[in-house]
Image (cartoon, rainbow, N blue to C red):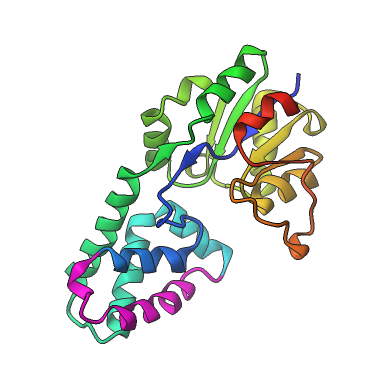
Amino acid sequence: MMPLVSAKSVRYPTISAATNAPITAISILRLFPLLDMHPPRVRQEANPSCASRFHHLPAIRRWRLQAASTRRAAVRDALTAADFHGLEHVADDIADHYAAYREANMYLYPDAIDVIDHFRGRGIKLCLVTNGAAEVQYAKIDRFGLRHRFDHIQVEEEAGFGKPDGRAYVDTLAALQIAPEDAMMIGDDLVWDVLAPKRLGMKGIWCNRLRAPLPPEAGVTPDLEITTLSQLPKSI
């Protein structure tokens, strides 16, 4: 039977832009009223401050695994660049306020549980592959009652590698005892959830909830494109 390797069922508040560090920093700054007197200047500095920290893969991985400290450092840099000196404690408050807002407003896509349970009922093996720190990811997994719904859960910090590293997919297939050609990856990231698994012989399903056009430079065509998870049962 074909297993489904799920990448993401959780929705973050629109303001978070979890995979876009510069937008994340701007969002942090918008949440803190102390800076209302000079918000444009600080926001202008947020982009280069974050961009300098996320220009190569090790830095991006550090952001995922050490999000709290990296987020705080990025905001401190933005404040300093905007001539707000000696406000390190304020920077930490901004970053922490954002993190709390993000977590408080996180919710599960309304169709996620029904679709997961549908495939479990069909006897299909399910695996959840997620990047990030184990404590953070398992808190979300347990908050939404997902742990018992998957045959295997692989978290980047525990595994020692994450998407789009090929080992993340190979180890997942090994845990399920499934060949690549018998598996499919479902997610919203064209590189992590479609391109990388397809290179290994898996099928890649793009969950394109925003109905974005396929970028010409994507270099990959999804085996299936859906806009909601509820479309899956009739498509597979």
x, y (%) of residue 135? 37, 39
**In the displayed structure, does residue 87 sit left or right of residue 180?**
left
- In what quadrant of the picture does the C terminus appear? top right
Residue depicted at 40% across the width and 38% down the height:
107
Vertical placement of residue 145 versus 122, above or below: below
Q: Is residue 65 left or right of residue 121?
A: left
Along the viewing direction, whichever of 101 and 54 lies nearer the viewer:
101
User: Which residues are the magenta region?
Assistant: 32-55
Q: Main secondary structure of the magenta part?
A: helix
Residue occupying the point 71% across, 46% down? 194
Magenta-colored stretch includes residue 210 = no
12 with respect to 205 (left or right):
left
The residue sitting at 57% across, 26% down in the picture is 152
Residue drawn at the location 21% of the way across and 72% of the way down: 88
Query: Above or below — where is 154 with respect to 123?
Result: below
Count of numbered badges drawn on the protein? 0
